[in-house]
């Protein structure tokens, strides 16, 4: 179990640029989640995949955000035309379906810290 | 919508002191409740959980009881250690027939334990 890996750890970009983050979940986990956390707040749900299918999307996920999980393995989160309000920690988590049904355990990565100047 | 309210920090305690971090929630139906912990420089880790009323979750000396009548899930530990210094998040997961797995988190409570 190597844990959930996120890259890069830090990203600084200028407003209007596009950025892409990568998440590698624990290998046998079929569920993958993206959350966003701003300073002094708890993580907020963005989207959820089961295998390669994106099953839930938060209203927080504007049209500028897109997430993919090709082949049900790693996932990418892209933000187009970044805005200063996008500055946050982007967290990825994974879980294994069947690990308790509802109330299942999520394993989080250390996150990608985005700063939009 | 669903929400979680937890006591604001930071909380500073001396080693071996008793810890309580209050957490209350608002949700429809019968949510599952969690405490996650984030140690410095690390990702969030599940500390304990409870999936139905009156369940008690416990781990590493921490406990929390799912109280539906007071919509609470307070975290307690009888004797804290310096290594418990971290940010603690209370969270809920709604239950629906189709299965909804998104977590709603509180704002977090930073705990510092001094020797």
Image: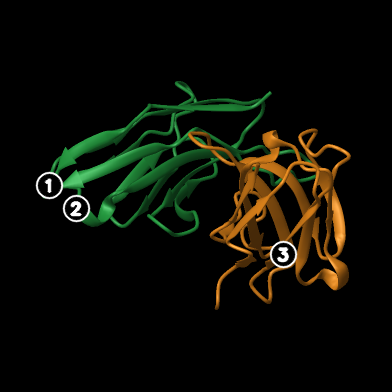
Chain colours: A orange, B green
The answer to whether residue B18 is seen in the rendering is: no
Q: Secondary structure at mark 1?
A: loop
- Residue for point 66% across, 29% down: B29
In this view, B78 is above or below B73: below
Between the C-alphas of marks 3 and 1, the distance is: 41 Å
Q: Nearer the viewer, residue A97 or A2?
A: A2
Label 2's element? loop
Residue B16 image offset from top left, x and y in percent: 12, 47
Name the spot of residue A11 as percent of width and height, x first: 64, 56
- Above or below, B6 relative to A93: above
Which residue is at a point 85% across and 42% down the rendered structure image? A64
Q: Residue at horizontal 75%, vertical 70%? A: A74
Identify the residue position indicated by label 2 in the image.
B81
User: x and y percent of residue B113 in the render?
Assistant: 20, 45
Labels 2 & 1 near each other (Cβ < 8 A):
yes
SS of the residue at dot 3?
A: strand
Chain of the residue displaying label 1: B
Badge 2 crowding class, 10 Å Cα cut-off, few under 14, some 14 to 19, many 20 or more, is some
Residue under disc 3 on the same chain as residue under disc 2: no
Q: Nearer the viewer, mark 3 or mark 2?
A: 3
Of the numbered discs in the image, which one, if any, rests on residue A22?
Answer: 3
């Amino acid at each position: 179990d190597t844990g959930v890996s996120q890259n890069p750890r830090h990203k600084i970009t200028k407003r209007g640029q596009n950025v892409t983050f990568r998440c590698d979940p624990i290998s046998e986990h079929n569920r993958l989640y993206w959350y966003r956390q701003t300073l002094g707040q708890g993580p907020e749900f963005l989207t959820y995949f089961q295998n390669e299918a994106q099953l839930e999307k938060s209203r927080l996920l504007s049209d500028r955000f897109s997430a993919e999980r090709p082949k049900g393995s790693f996932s990418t989160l892209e933000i187009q035309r970044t805005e200063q309000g996008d500055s946050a920690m982007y967290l990825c988590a994974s879980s294994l379906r069947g690990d308790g049904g509802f109330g299942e355990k999520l394993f989080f990565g250390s996150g990608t810290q985005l700063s939009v100047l | 919508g669903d929400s979680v309210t937890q006591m604001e920090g930071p909380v500073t305690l001396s080693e071996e002191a008793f810890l309580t971090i209050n957490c209350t929630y608002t949700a429809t139906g019968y949510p599952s409740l969690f405490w996650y912990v984030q140690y410095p420089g690390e990702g969030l880790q599940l500390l304990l959980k409870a999936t139905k009323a009156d369940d008690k979750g416990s781990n590493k000396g921490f406990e929390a009881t799912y109280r539906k009548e007071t919509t609470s899930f307070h975290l307690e530990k009888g004797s804290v250690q310096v290594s418990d210094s971290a940010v603690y998040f209370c969270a809920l997961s709604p239950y629906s027939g189709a299965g909804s797995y998104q977590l709603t988190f509180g704002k977090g409570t930073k705990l510092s334990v001094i020797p």
